[in-house]
Amino acid sequence: VQPLELVFVIDSSESVGPENFEVIKDFMNTLIDRASVSPEVTRVGIVLYSHINLVVTSIQHRLSRDEVKAAIRRMPYIGEGTYTGSGIRKANEIFRFARPGVKKMAVVITDGQTDHRDTVKLEDAVREAHSADITMLVIGVVNQSNPIYEDFKQELKSIASPPKEQHVFSIEDFRMLF
């Protein structure tokens, strides 16, 4: 089993809503069950973002699978703006604790375009992540009939690592995470 540094960057903004936030938590715990989470193999960090960032766990905490799952269950719903750039920058900071030579992957889950009030430009945070060799996988939740669909899809592609088609997943409903 290849070691991995895995950081979830989770949108906890108003548009997600408390019910969908619970779906995200269930999805994350399902992934944690399938991964070899342990301090020796896969270490997990979690950043919740809205108008503020909250580090739920960091890869340096060296948590067991059960400890990570408990932390996910305790995650609070924030319910304000969508400051995606700030959330990604916080994840970049967590990756500074990565083990040398170990693959770094961020999984960004969001349902909306970044808020223009965010002081961290999305493209700057993404450029920092890509130059730090962080594989960026992004899951965007938006209905294709939504007027912002095309712009949102472009934003998702801008976040994702190449090849984009392997790192961007677009779904219409949070329940489709499963």
Image (cartoon, rainbow, N blue to C red):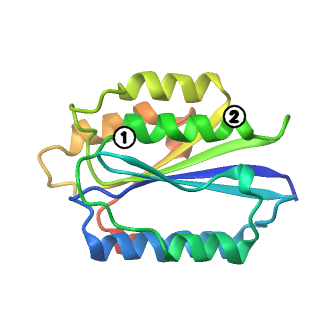
| Image position of 65 with respect to 109: above or below | below
Q: Which label number is shown at residue 152?
A: none
Taking the spot 30% from the left edge, 68% from the top edge, the residue there is: 173
> Does 38 appear above or below 55?
below
Q: Nearer the viewer, residue 79 or 176?
A: 79
Count of numbered badges drawn on the protein: 2
Q: Is residue 93 visible?
A: yes
Q: Residue 172: give x, y in percent of width and height.
A: 29, 63
Q: Amino acid at mark 1?
A: Thr
Residue appearing at x 47%, y 38% in the figure: 88
Residue 16's image quarter?
bottom left
Q: Provide the residue designation for mark 2.
A: 96
Amino acid tagged 2: Arg
Label 2 residue SS: helix
Question: Quick one: label 1 or label 2, which is nearer the N terminus?
Answer: 1
User: Which of the two residues, 102 or 65, is positioned nearer the viewer here?
Assistant: 65
Q: Nearer the viewer, residue 30 or 84?
A: 84
Q: Quadrant of residue 35?
A: bottom right
Q: Which mark is residue 84?
A: 1
Task: Identify which residue is drawn at 35% across, 25% down.
Answer: 121
